[in-house]
Image (cartoon, coloured by chain):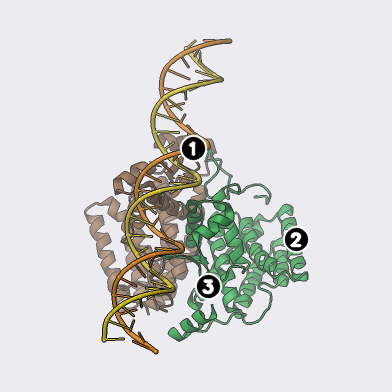
Chain colours: A green, B brown, C orange, D yellow
Amino acid sequence: MIEPSNQNFELMAAKPRPKSDAPDVSDRVSRIREGVTAAILEHRLLPGTKLGEDEIGEIYGASRTLVRTALQQLAHEGIVNIEKNRGAFVARPTPADAREVFEARRLIEPTIVDHACEAVSPAWIERLQQHLTEEREAELRGDARASVRLSGDFHRLIAEMSGHSIYLGFLKELIARSSLIILLYRRHDTPACGTDHHAEIVTAIRKRDKQAARTQMLSHLNEIEAELFLKDPAADELRLADVLGV
Amino acid sequence: MIEPSNQNFELMAAKPRPKSDAPDVSDRVSRIREGVTAAILEHRLLPGTKLGEDEIGEIYGASRTLVRTALQQLAHEGIVNIEKNRGAFVARPTPADAREVFEARRLIEPTIVDHACEAVSPAWIERLQQHLTEEREAELRGDARASVRLSGDFHRLIAEMSGHSIYLGFLKELIARSSLIILLYRRHDTPACGTDHHAEIVTAIRKRDKQAARTQMLSHLNEIEAELFLKDPAADELRLADVLGV
DNA sequence: ACAGGCGAAACTTTATACAATCTTCGCCCA
DNA sequence: TGGGCGAAGATTGTATAAAGTTTCGCCTGT
């Protein structure tokens, strides 16, 4: 069983040194990556925004070498597009991309929450409850940015709980893209993720009720996607709208 | 419907320039990455092998900047580990990693082949048949390296056929890791992927028989994993065996 | 007035130089 | 003889400079 506090995935001490995939928080590249990621996920950086290397480097007091490394990682995660000889831009997912992302989430997340039911422990429950509280607080004080970030963090937390590092990696990518998609295509100003659903999922996990957990997760994802307006673009018509929208 | 020959994912011409994720074959970084990837997937580079930056750079006639970029991409794909201040090494997946990889494949690939059944077209069928022929030829002439690569390519081909770019990206990663896992943990010298299974899967796809395709794919994956010897390591005991085995 | 082309500026890409860190090997001492 | 300390060598991490590409403004010619 994996506890929430300590670094996971050290189970078999096979590596004498910390695994490269682990978040080296003190790493300067990671600081840049996480800073930019947060800005994108909290919708402070809008899709299409150019991310100049000099600009970012100056902000973080780093050379372009490090900025470039961070941007390449973000490109691999799918939330930044790097166009040759033109630079990096915040990604602008198409409706087709959006449907793919949510299809993948509907496939993976029920399985993840299934694993989470098996990994449940008092420490994890407390961690989840604490998270729900944070979400409610952000909602109450109308902090939209924090709300967006926290609703993504909820899903990531469950993936961490599952102890399945590959699913976790995949889901991180899907969540980041989802955040952009929601920003671009949501119909109303409804909160990105209803906290109520999250609470119900936690309840199911606590009961170790896999079936309920899967069902709740699935309907939660369906609801999020249902709030989107993913029109099939009449080719260049949408393109025009996009460009003008920026 | 997507045809095999042309570059996929250009469906909505949304981007004036080629998508960054597309394989820029002429790109020098990509050449390095694909060269190293091929060497790893064909088992010419063994797990644990150090990948010195100067060494690779000299081979490809490139500066360390480019080599470093390529290695970072490979690290993100999970087939290379980068240890701080020590360099890059061919990854050495643990049995736990192996189980995760195959679990993920069992989750994703049935869905992928499902999509493939919908995307089927004469051109794709021909492409698949041609691939099966290549696999048989490599098998006949005992070209183990080509066999390993081609059996991975088969699964990737189906993912491309599905037209689902996210699943394709995930699967690429899983296939690359699988190749390392098979190298490390297979019991006998059985071929990595029975061509017979592949042929059966193609047949199911051609008939657009989703149920059969899913079942065939699942049992195929199960069979591959069954040929592995994924013992839970008594911690350092396995580590020792590994080290001596190299 | 407008289309086309030339040219400078800004940026990305690549290469190289410098700094920091780790590894190795020899030496010294217990 | 075994272990620990330390300096030399090698390798990676970071910054900066050189090279190439794109973009945009301006100018000229029709």
Label 3: chain letter: A
Secondary structure category for the residue under label 2: helix
Characterize the local packing of mark 2: few (<14), some (14-19) or many (20 or more) Cα atoms within 10 angstroms.
some
In the visual, does A215 lie left or right of B129? Answer: right
Label 1: chain letter: B
Toward the viewer: D30 or B215? D30
Report the Cα–Cα distance between label 2 and label 3: 28 Å
What residue appears at the point 61 percent right and 79 percent down from the top-left corner?
A: A186
Tell me residue D14's x, y (percent): 50, 46
What residue appears at the point 53 percent right and 61 percent down from the top-left corner?
A: A170
Tell me residue B159's x, y (percent): 40, 68
Q: Is residue B231 visible?
A: yes
Residue named by callout 2: A129
* Both marks 3 and 1 on one chain: no
Which quadrant, please, contains the C terminus of chain A?
bottom right
Toward the viewer: A142 or A230? A142
Residue named by callout 3: A103
Residue named by callout 1: B239
B123 versus B22 height, above or below? below
In the visual, does B61 lie left or right of B119? Answer: left
Q: Amino acid at mark 2?
A: Gln
B171 versus B91 height, above or below? below
Q: Is residue B226 visible?
A: no
Q: Amino acid at mark 3?
A: Glu
Tell me residue C28's x, y (percent): 50, 11
Toward the viewer: D30 or B34? D30
Report the Cα–Cα distance between label 3 and label 1: 39 Å
As drawn, which residue projects farthest toward the left? B141
> Circles 2 and 1: CB distance less than 8 Å?
no
Characterize the local packing of mark 3: few (<14), some (14-19) or many (20 or more) Cα atoms within 10 angstroms.
some
